[in-house]
Image (spheres, grey):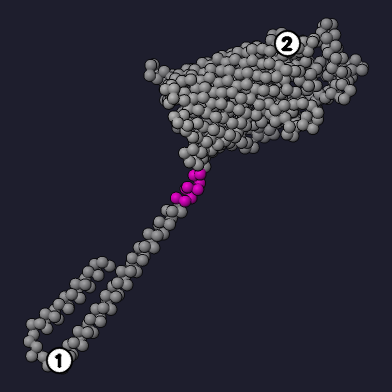
Amino acid sequence: MKKFLRKGAKMRALLVGGISLLFLLSPLHVFADSEIDALKSQLNKMSEMMQQLQQKIENLEKAKASEVTKAEVKELDKRLNKAELHTATDKISFGVELRTRGDSIHYDGIQVAPRALVNSFFGDYSQGQGFNGATIPQARQMMQQMAMAGMIPPTETYDHDNDFIFTNRLRLDMKAKVNNHLSFAGRLAMYKVFGDSSGVLNYNGNMGTVALDGNTTSIPHGDILHVERAYFNYRQNAGEVPINFSLGRRPATEGAPLEYRNYSLVGGSPIATIINWQFDGASLNFGLEDVTTIPGAAFKLCYGVGFEADYGNYVANTTSSLDDVSFGGFIATLFDNDATSVTMNYAHAWNLSDGFTGTLVMPFSATQNPDGTLNFQPNTGGYISRMEPMTNIGDLDLLTVLVSTNLYDYLADIDLFFAPSWSHTDPSGVSQQPFYKLMGQGLLSNADANGKLESHDGYMIYAGARFPMPADAKLGIEYNWGSEYWFNMTGAEDSLIGGKLATRGQVFEAYYIQPIYGQNFFVTLGGQYYDYEYTGSGNPLGAPVEISKLTSMDAVFPVVDEVWNAYLSFTLRY
């Protein structure tokens, strides 16, 4: 088109110039007046023709420009729509993790009370056949007489193997940044056993068999997506101190140092040796690195609620006095230069209760009638019941220090960690749940003849190392030991057996992680050995009993001595 326009302009100029030159070179006297008029007329017509041609050329130019403009506008609109859609969908960014795992679990030396003794709870007291219909003093007297007469039979012992059990765990992580001061984070999760989505288990004395608010996504509960965490974080600077305030369902599971065997970043803020539990609460963090010149120095205040007493519970409609279970504490990062870190975590729980609200299938029900007599009924139909606390049983203190380091600058890419921990219980009363009341059980203590309970200190050590292997693989070994009165809040630890960090005894574990596509897809092969020394690991009720000295009265629920577990998992994380 431009070439055509250039040619038209040259032709017009050449024609006009030629005519003008001819007119100038020719003497005027040669032409008659009539000829001059005729020539003028022809020139006028030619001028009109040239104007029409010029108009057509301009119209063509406009039409062509319009087509180009429309195409450009269409392309620009397409880009803007795409950018607008991208902005809208990117308000929340999502990540996904899917883990499929197989375990082979073998229980050795399980002890349980003989069926005849268990049935005595359902026998008629008035007929001398059992405890049903007896008051608590009468039932206790009967148990003492049985012990003195040697009528309490020894426990029965058996082994149990679950050769193969498979699980799927799905996590959907959510993040959103509103601006430089405000952000949101959350996680939806599903965790289920192959072939089961009931979400409710038979209670066997292990708190992991109760569906609780604190473990809905950390222990298999079916194919329902639960909200594991959802919280906002507000950040502002006070001079040289960055301050972060956060409210919501806390990121309180899989804290340090579990990231080593999980092949991930640190999953939660509490140190996992004392708290691994989903809860709702708040935190206030102060970054102190600039004001102290200590690398990574920070101090975080934490608060949470473990049980709400006045919502939806039977005791809320009675004269019983039951307080909420709440806890607070701090996390102090004493040093962290990316290679080495030292962190201290302290927590205090007020008004611990004799359980939390949850659902389960109890092997029997125990109630106390208005006249004080007991009523025990076997749950032969497998009916689901709602468990709820009846009594505040005392306070709890927890303290741990985690030291971790990487030896890359000195030797090799070797990770080491060590975490000593301490617990202290201060019981305030015996549980009013009829069965535990009969047994005189309070917070890690049994009442003496005068109803007195004792405070106790517990201890735990947790240590591990992770070594580099060929093909970017990692080999890890871990060990933990817990004392007789050790207790923590780790009921959400990812385990089909029971939280290893709650064990009153010792646990050995070794694992091998082989990346296939870095941390996006990897395989883990591992093994665990649990050696329990005392009963009640992870359970706050009752005094622990040395497993080698068990009686049938201590084994109404099964008591495990040793567990062997081998596992293989495939994890996709993106």
The answer to whether residue 17 shows anywhere in this view is yes
Q: Nearer the viewer, residue 182 or 51?
A: 182
- Point out the image quarter for the N terminus: bottom left
Q: Upstream in the sequence, badge 1 or badge 2?
A: 1
34 relative to 181, above or below: below
Q: Secondary structure at mark 1?
A: helix
Image coordinates for residue 257, horizontal then vertical, percent: 52, 22
Residue extending farthest to the front is 239
Residue at 51%, 16% (x, y): give it.
Answer: 418
> Circle 2 is placed at which residue position?
550
Is there a contact, CB below 8 Å, between mark 1 and mark 2?
Answer: no
Q: Is residue 218 magenta?
A: no
Residue extent of the magenta highlight: 83-91
409 sits to left or right of 529:
left
Residue bearing mark 1: 35
Residue pictured at 19% horizontal, 84% vertical: 43
Q: Is residue 335 above or below residue 49?
A: above
Q: Which disc is residue 106 wearing? A: none
Considering depth in this image, is 463 or 92 the residue closer to the camera? 92
- Percent position of residue 419, x then y: 53, 16
